[in-house]
Image (tube, coloured by chain):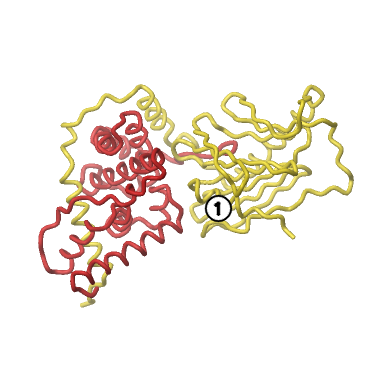
Amino acid sequence: MLIFLTLIDSDDGKETFICIYEKYKDLMFREALSILRNEADAEDAVQEAFFAIAKNISKISDPECPKTRSFVVIIVKRKALNILKKRHPDAEFIDEINSESEAEDGHDLDSLLERWLYKLPDKYRDVLLLKYHFGYSLKEISEIMNISLSNAQKIDQRAKAKLREIARDEGYDI
Amino acid sequence: MKAMTFEDHLSIAAARVADHIADSVPNEDGCKHEFSERFEQNMQEFIDNWGRKKKHPIIRKILLIAAAILLAFGILMASNSEIRAAVTGWFKELYCNFTVFRYHGYSEPEVPDSWELPKYELTWVPEEYELKDRIEHTYFALDVYVNSEQEMLTLEYLYGDDGGAAFIDTQKAKMEKVLVGDTEAEFYRQEGIASNTLVWQDQEGFLFIVDGFEDLDTLIRIAENVQLKE
């Protein structure tokens, strides 16, 4: 920070933030620890996640709802993976981590896309979730994920291209 | 009825995946953790300071930055006779919460009448940033870019004459050595919602500072696109 710049500019969202902080900090720590296996690093990830949440607090209307719960989990996992990547800069596997599918079988397009989303690397899926479910712009996503805007744009495009590729492999044209 | 697009279906699928994520993590009550004192302090301070700092209009920010730089020049030029380093260049010192880059040289500042500060410019900045203002002084220049969210991105460069100094608030910053092209640089990553800073010097005695709300890779790319204006 050169000389000084402002942080949060108004009281708006402070109560919401405190509510999220009190409710989810332990859960977020646990999620970060499961990735980092180091308590100090996990706390750093939680802290980074809360700073990102604070910056986007205006988009959170209900701290208690499942949408907020999944949002904080996605953010803290992303921050933890960023720290892990920093600790192991040559470990390409970090970008390729996939979560286990929890999608139910179904043959309508929504169900298929749900299943295919789980086949994407977490980083790709997170960008699509943040954009299409949580309603963040790519600029906001780039800030949340500590990546450049152009990188976020690339991931968004590649993620959708990958979804189409997976669909083609399964005999669908989307 | 309007047909659903691919994006519409993707939104539905994304919502379902997000719901699974929410369901897959344990109940909050089942994972209590005693956070470190450092963490608790940082977060408490962050919450306590929420809303305290009022937003300055951009122009006021620019003027405050310029005033701080001018003040630094004035103070250090006045005390110049006491500064006599064995070698010439920009040196780093810690002062209160600031890291100060100060120029130490052999000679009294002698600037020929015809001397003009070279004009450096950024030939690449991230989308959405536009040049808002430029402040120029005998020994330094500051280009200020602003995006639609009123976030500032600045390029500052200072010519190395005795007394030149730049202050960076590094109280909560983590520093790492990086490269801008082939040149060693220092990257100050701020905790929380504050801008990051990249600092390096060239062989001609200039200190360059790029500061903005961008990540390391982006700031390096910006820095690598600092070029002398023809």
In the rendering, what colour is chain B?
yellow
Q: Is the residue B174 above or below the residue B20 in the image?
A: above
Horizontal and vertical percent position of residue B136? 73, 47
Q: Secondary structure at mark 1?
A: helix
Q: Nearer the viewer, residue A22 or A118?
A: A118
Query: Picture coordinates of residue A110 (x, y %)?
Result: 18, 65
Camera-side residue: A28 or B69?
A: A28
For the point 22% across and 56% down, which residue is it?
A: A118
Q: Nearer the viewer, residue A43 or B28?
A: A43
Image quadrant assignment for residue A129: bottom left
| Three-letter amino acid code at the position of disc 1 | Arg
Say above or below: B25 vs B4: above
Location of residue B107 by image quarter: top right
What is the total number of numbered labels drawn onto the structure image? Answer: 1
Q: Which residue is mark 1?
A: B221
The outermost residue toward the left is A105
Instruction: Please identify which colour was used for chain A in the image.
Output: red
